[in-house]
Amino acid sequence: MKIEFSKWMHAAAVCVLLCLTCGCGEKDGSIPPPPPPPPSGGGNSTTPGTGGSGGSGTTSSAITLDNVVWTLDFEENFDGTSVNTQNWSMYNSQGHAGHGLRRPSAFSVKDGNLVITAEMLDDMVVSGGMRHKKDYLYPVRFEFRARCEEDPSLAMSGVVLTWPKAGSKEDNGELDVFETGHSRQSRRPLNTFIHYRGGKQIHKAHDVDASQWQEMAMDWFENSLHIYLNGERVWDINDKGKVPDTMHHICLQLDAFEHKMTGTCHMYVDYVRIYTGSKK
C-alpha cells in the first residue's frame, strides 16, 4: 500500500514530536529498536523479508531475486514470552571450548526479541546457545537481525552461524555469518568466518558496530556463498571447495572464551527467516 507523501511527512513529524516530549532512546538497559526495513521498490533490495521493527511487519512468502525464487520456509519473530521449543533446542552443556556452561536459563524473550544473557553464577560463566531443529541443504537463504553488547571483560562473543547436521566443521564446514569476537570491548568490526574442510578458514571484517542492530543474510548455493549486510551484498565465495555440501542448521550463541567475566553481557536477536530457493 502506498502512502501519500503529505501523510508520510505528517506521520514523521508526529514521531519526532513524541520522541522530543517522551525522551525516547536506550536507557535503563532497555532494548533499542531495530533499524527500519529497507525501502520498497527500486529493484536493489537484497532482502526478501519486508518485516519492520520487532519483526512485526509482513513477510513475503515467495519472492524472486537474482533469478532465484525464494520461498519462505521458516520465520521466527520472538513475539511470545519464551523460546518456542518446538522449533528450537537450547543447549544444556559445557560452554564454548570448555569455558563455563551453556544453560537454557540464559534465554528469555522480551519486547519481540530473543535475549541471551551471560553472567557469573556460582563462580562460573553461564551463557547460552540454541539451534534450529530443521536442517537444510542448498539452495537456501538464512537471514536475521542481531546485536551483541560490548563486554569490558573480553570474555563473550556473539555468533549466528550454521552448523553441520553430521558435526565436525573440519569435515563439513561451519559458516559464522555474524561473529563479534571477544578480544576487544568494541563490537566493531563485525566478522564473517567461513570454515571449510581441513580445518581451514577465510574471513571478512565488516566496518560496522555489532553492538547496534545489524541485518544479515547468507545465500548458500551448491557452488557459492553470498553474504549480505544491511541490504547490500558484501562478500561472494565462489570457490566450491570452500562451500559445504552437507546439511546445516542455524544456531544462535553467546560464546565464552574465558572462565571469568565481570557484570553481564546480552545478545539480542530480532528475527530469523529461512527461505528455500529454486532457479527461475
Image: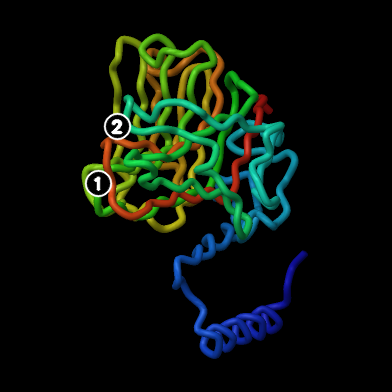
Q: Which residue is mark 1?
A: 154
Q: Estimate the x, y position of residue 221 in percent, counting from the top left.
A: 53, 22
Whether residue 156 is visible to the viewer of this picture, yes or no, is yes
Q: Estimate the x, y position of residue 64 in percent, counting from the top left.
A: 67, 38
Quarter of the image containing the N terminus?
Answer: bottom right
Q: For residue 65, which quarter of the picture?
A: top right
Q: Amino acid at mark 1?
A: Leu
Give the CA separation, mark 2 to mark 1.
21 Å
Indicate whether 51 appears above or below 3: above
Residue sitting farthest toward the front: 122
Q: Secondary structure at mark 1?
A: loop
Quarter of the image containing the C terminus?
Answer: top right
Local packing at callout 1 (Cα closer than 10 Å; few below 14, some 14-19, many 20+) is: some
Q: Estimate the x, y position of residue 56 in percent, counting from the top left.
A: 69, 57
Residue sitting farthest toward the left: 183
Viewer-closest of 234 and 49: 49
Viewer-closest of 122 and 6: 122
Q: Amino acid at mark 2?
A: His
Please report the residue visible at 50 percent of the width from the left and 43 percent of the height from the top.
106
Query: How does the figure colour the protein chain or chains?
Result: rainbow
Decide which of tag 2 and tag 1 comes sooner along the chain: 1
Q: For residue 42, which quarter of the picture?
A: bottom right
Q: For residue 253, which quarter of the picture?
A: top left
Whether residue 178 is visible to the viewer of this picture, yes or no, is no
Please report the residue visible at 63 percent of the width from the left and 32 percent of the height from the top.
88
Mark drawn on residue 6: none
Local packing at callout 2 (Cα closer than 10 Å; few below 14, some 14-19, many 20+) is: few
Mark drawn on residue 203: 2
Please report the residue visible at 29 percent of the width from the left and 26 percent of the height from the top.
202
Please report the residue visible at 54 percent of the width from the left and 37 percent of the height from the top.
104
Horizontal side of residue 279 vs 243, given as left or right = right
What is the tally of numbered marks visible in this picture?
Answer: 2
